[in-house]
Amino acid sequence: MLDKTKIGYEFNPFTVDIEKGRLCFFADVIGETNPIYKDETAARAAGYKTIPAPATFMMSVELGSPDFLPVLTLLEMDIGRILHGSQEFEYPGIIYAGDKITSVSKIIDIFDKKGGALEFVVIESSYTNQDGELVGKARQTVVYRN
Amino acid sequence: MSDIQVGSEIPSLTLPAISRGTLALYAGASGDHNPIHIDIDFAKKAGMDDVFAQGMLSMAYLGRFLTAWQPQSQLRKFTTRFATITNLYDVITCSGKVVELIEQNGETLARCEIQACREDGVQTLAGEALIAVS
């Protein structure tokens, strides 16, 4: 069973550079056709400061942690047994190309179902830009197959 | 005044069939380096028949679908539950509609029920989006 005493654990904050090339790569891979996601001129014409990160890119900020998925080490989880259960994003602002985004994350719950056959870890994160503005919030549930 | 009403449908988006190439490229672009999505040997050792799609790939498709309808600057909240694994060769369609208009922080928000489905109609992702319409 996963160590429930880790509920409340705060991960080390980290900061990620939001690179334009990476955003363009992401946009290409998901087949994005809206020019604002690759072209600064189109982005500005649509009222954005510059190229915005696509709506789900917040997760890629999280995956930019110096230790890939630090929850795995913390809770001694095997990466082959994790599944993504659910994901929530809130958008108090927008993440832009060129930003430096700081992620702060914390484990807010660990519970099990089906007599421990499945365990769940809920992690809440917030994302702040270089100007101290809160630009995103996320909550993810990781499912662990026992 | 917006013409978005309860019952308004969001134009659906059907994606190309999931390929190994897409999974590999998405792993690189998203930073999700979990080998279960890109390395068949690893996937088999973990008890799967083959690699399978990152849940976040389908959520990214849903994001594309939402922001093709309304600008991303209007998006306030976006949530999904991953109901079923998305496999190789699945053809995913994103669809959804406005189910409620609510007032929040001085804005009118369209609460939309959204989903990603396979060709056989089975739901892979189900969720909700709140989008400012005023």
Image (spheres, rainbow, N blue to C red):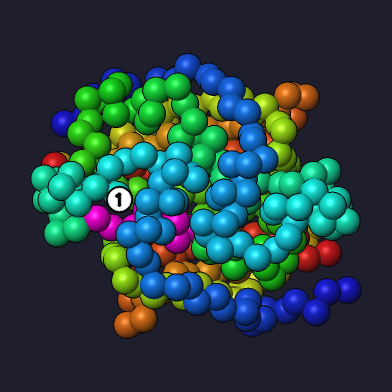
Judge from the rendering whether residue B107 lies leftward or rightward of residue B17; answer left or right: right
Where are the magenta residues, as a range?
B51-59
Residue B54 inside the magenta-drawn segment: yes
Query: Residue beneath label 1, please?
Result: B37
Question: B84 or B44: nearer the eye?
Answer: B44
Q: Amino acid at mark 1?
A: His
Residue B113 inside the magenta-drawn segment: no
Q: Is residue A119 above or below residue B38?
A: above
* Residue A54 spot, x, y in % from top left: 63, 51
Residue at screen point 57% across, 49% down: A25
Question: B116 or A63: nearer the eye?
Answer: A63
Judge from the rendering whether residue B30 lies leftward or rightward of residue B88; answer left or right: right
Res B128 seen here? no
Q: Is residue B61 above or below residue B17?
A: above
Res B85 seen here? yes
* Residue A7 spot, x, y in % from top left: 36, 25
Question: B120 or B106: nearer the eye?
Answer: B120
Q: Quadrant of residue A136?
A: top right
**What is the quadrant of the N terminus of chain A in the image?**
top left
Judge from the rendering whether residue B47 lies leftward or rightward of residue A132; answer left or right: left
* Residue A94 spot, x, y in % from top left: 72, 43
Question: B31 or A110: nearer the eye?
Answer: B31
Q: Is residue B70 above or below residue B74?
A: below
Residue at screen point 47% across, 17% down: A12
Give the chain letter at badge 1. Answer: B
